[in-house]
Amino acid sequence: MEKEIIISKLSKIFSEVLEEKITLDNLDANLVDDIGLDSMGFLEVSVMIQREFDISMPSEDWENVKTVSDLLTTIERKISENEKK
C-alpha cells in the first residue's frame, strides 16, 4: 500500500477521533505534542488502525511510536508481515 494512501486513511482516523480536521503532512509531528492525542485517543486510534488496515498492533508496537513517521513505518511493516503470511 502506498504511503500517500496510508497517510490519507490515518488523517481520516485522527480527524474522527479528535473531532477536528487533521492533515498528517508533517511526518515529524509528535502524536502527543503536535497532534494532540491523549491516552484515550491512542486507544481509539489503535483500534481503528487495526480495523482499517487489517493488522494487529499490540501495545508493544506502540512503545516506539512517537511521530507520524514512526506510525507510518510500523503500519507499513505490519502490512508487509501480513502479506508474507
Image (cartoon, grey):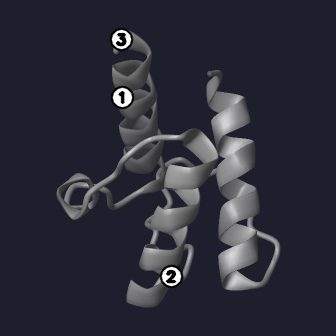
Asked if the residues shown at circle 1 and circle 2 are in contact, with their CB atoms under 8 angstroms apart, the answer is no
Camera sees residue 20: yes
Camera sees residue 23: no
Q: For this view, does 10 lie left or right of residue 60?
A: right
Q: Distance of mark 3 from mark 2, alpha carbons?
A: 30 Å
Image location of residue 9, percent across then percent down: 71, 48
* Mark 1 residue element: helix
Closer to the N terminus: mark 1 or mark 2?
2
* Mark 2 residue element: helix
Which quadrant does the N terminus fall into?
top right
Asked if the residues shown at circle 1 and circle 3 are in contact, with their CB atoms under 8 angstroms apart, the answer is no
Image location of residue 57, percent across then percent down: 34, 52
Image location of residue 27, percent across then percent down: 53, 47
Residue at numbered disc 2: 41
Q: For this view, does 19 lie left or right of residue 38?
A: right
Asked if the residues shown at circle 3 and circle 2 are in contact, with their CB atoms under 8 angstroms apart, the answer is no
Specify the quadrant of the image occupied by residue 84. top left
Closer to the N terminus: mark 3 or mark 2?
2
At 74% from the left and 71% from the top, the residue drawn is 15
Name the front one of labels 3 and 2: 3
Residue at numbered disc 1: 77
Which amino acid type is shown beneath numbered disc 1? Answer: Arg
Residue at numbered disc 3: 84
Image location of residue 10, percent across then percent down: 65, 53
Q: Residues within 10 Å of mark 1 (few under 14, many from 20)?
A: few
Q: Where is 70 relative to 83, above or below?
A: below
Q: Where is 60 relative to 44, above or below?
A: above
Q: Residue furthest right?
A: 21
